[in-house]
Amino acid sequence: MKFLYTILFCFILFAGAFAQGDTVPALGVKELYLAKDDGKGKAGEQVSEFSTGDIPIYCVVMLDSATKVTVKMNFVAVSVSGVKPDTKVVTASYTMKEGQNRVNFTGTPEGKWTPGKYRVDIFIDGKIARDLVFEIKGSGGNTDAGRSFAPTDTPKSLPKRTRKP
């Protein structure tokens, strides 16, 4: 009887260890940033703000592992004049090869960007991994400048013209 209790005790004690499968740690985004073009057609330095003429905008994704996965980017208009909130502007995906851990996505509009608040959503194998919110500002600074324009100096009067006979 004692032997039976010992076997039962060992079975209960080790059942949890046998029930666990091989778990693969979740793959994540090590680094996510946006960049302007470096002038040579590649992603330049990291920036957090863009103007309407910054074309293309690069989205650089670095994973914390070099495993074969599919990385997807949704470029979303969050608060942009004339665009329904949360509209996907650009969507792209790339299947990483074994040994790769970096992918560069680019966003290019037709014409120029519309000023406003945007977001990039990054998915790994269909699951949201990270997002990043940023702003695209009008290239001329304040886009309402024409409405608030006021002259700063009183114009000087022009010299009188004299007619020659």
Image (cartoon, grey):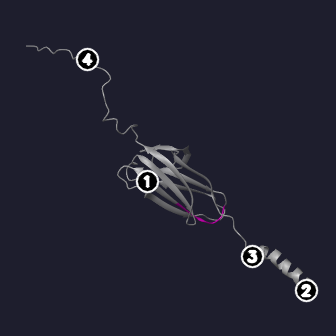
On the rendered structure, is 86 left or right of 44? Answer: left
Name the mark nearer the viewer: 1 or 4.
Answer: 1
Upstream in sequence: badge 1 or badge 4: 1
Q: Is residue 67 magenta?
A: yes
Whole-percent x, y for residue 145 in the image: 34, 35
Residue 90 numbered tag? none
144 lies above or below 165: below
The residue under label 4 is: 156
Q: Are marks 2 and 3 in contact (CB under 8 Å)?
A: no
Upstream in sequence: badge 3 or badge 4: 3
The residue under label 1 is: 77
Classify 10 Å Cα crowding around label 4: few (below 14), some (14-19), many (20 and above). Answer: few
The residue under label 2 is: 1
Upstream in sequence: badge 2 or badge 1: 2
Of residues 84 and 54, the one drawn nearer to the viewer in this rendering: 84
For the point 37% across and 50% down, the residue is: 111
Q: Over which residues does the magenta segment extend?
A: 66-72
Name the mark nearer the viewer: 3 or 4.
Answer: 3
Q: Identify the amino acid type marked 3.
A: Ala
Q: Are marks 2 and 1 in contact (CB under 8 Å)?
A: no
Instruction: Identify the secondary structure beneath mark 2.
Output: loop
Q: Identify the amino acid type marked 1.
A: Ala
Q: Identify the amino acid type marked 4.
A: Lys
Instruction: Identify the secondary structure beneath mark 1.
Output: strand
Instruction: Identify the secondary structure beneath mark 4.
Output: loop
For the point 50% across and 54% down, the residue is: 120
The residue under label 3 is: 19
Q: How far apart in space, not on screen, are marks 3 and 1 (Cα)? A: 46 Å
Classify 10 Å Cα crowding around label 2: few (below 14), some (14-19), many (20 and above). Answer: few
